[in-house]
Image (cartoon, rainbow, N blue to C red):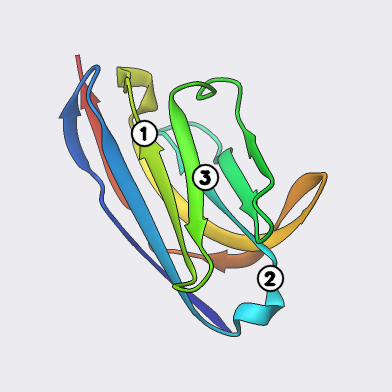
Amino acid sequence: QVQLVESGGGLVQAGGSLRLSCAASGSIFSFNAMAWYRQAPGKQRELVAAISRGGSENYADSVKGRFTISRDNAKNTVYLQMNSLKPEDTAVYYCNAGYYSSSYYPRNYWGQGTQVTVSS
């Protein structure tokens, strides 16, 4: 089993920044990549950014140039630096552990979610 613990959400004004963290523990060899998803009220959960253990990254078009995903393999932790936040970034953000092979493939390992609210 894999446990994912997120932190770093909160309330911020439009144009501000937040940094999310997700620490993984347990069977860390059962995945080779991690990702952030988000789900806004009434919408489907969507992939925001993913990163492989080797550092390959991909991003949703809506966050390119504003969000940066990174990871510390020694700490089994993934980060999401979110800059120039917009009200439409408001959502619950979830960490996921999965596989990366040209695209990201999630496994059923999810964090508890952290709320990000951007006020206009």
Q: Position of residue 9 (x, y in %)?
A: 25, 47
Among the two numbered marks 1 and 3 on one chain, the one whose residue lies closer to the N terminus: 3
> Picture coordinates of residue 64 (x, y %)?
54, 23
Q: Could you classify mark 1 by the number of other residues whose Cα lies within 10 Å: few (under 14), some (14-19), or many (20 or more)? A: many
Which amino acid type corresponds to the residue marked 1 in the rendered image? Met
Crowding at dot 2, Cα within 10 Å, few <14 / some 14-19 / many 20+, comes out as: some
Circle 3: element type: strand
Is residue 113 in sight in this rendering? no
Number of on-image labels: 3
Quarter of the image where the C terminus is located:
top left
Mark linked to residue 37: 3
Q: Which residue carries the number 2 mark? A: 31
Q: Residue at x 53, y 68 (%)?
A: 73
Q: To which residue does mark 1 refer?
A: 82
Residue 84 visible to the viewer: yes
Q: Disc 1 to disc 3, how far (Cα)?
A: 13 Å
Picture coordinates of residue 106, whole percent (x, y): 68, 57
Work out whether 43 lies above or below 119.
below
What type is the residue that disc 3 sits on?
A: Tyr
Residue in the picture at 17% in, 35% down: 11
Q: Earlier in the sequence, mark 2 or mark 1?
A: 2
Frontmost residue, 97 versus 55: 55
Instruction: Identify whether 111 is placed above or below 50.
Output: below
The span from disc 3 to disc 2 (Cα, nearest Å) is 16 Å
Circle 2: element type? loop
Of badges 1 and 3, the one in the foreground is 1
Specify which label sits upstream in the sequence, 3 or 2.
2
Q: Nearer the viewer, residue 92 or 41?
A: 92
Picture residue at 52% right of the left edge, 45% below the top: 37
- Coordinates of residue 116 in the picture (x, y in percent): 28, 39
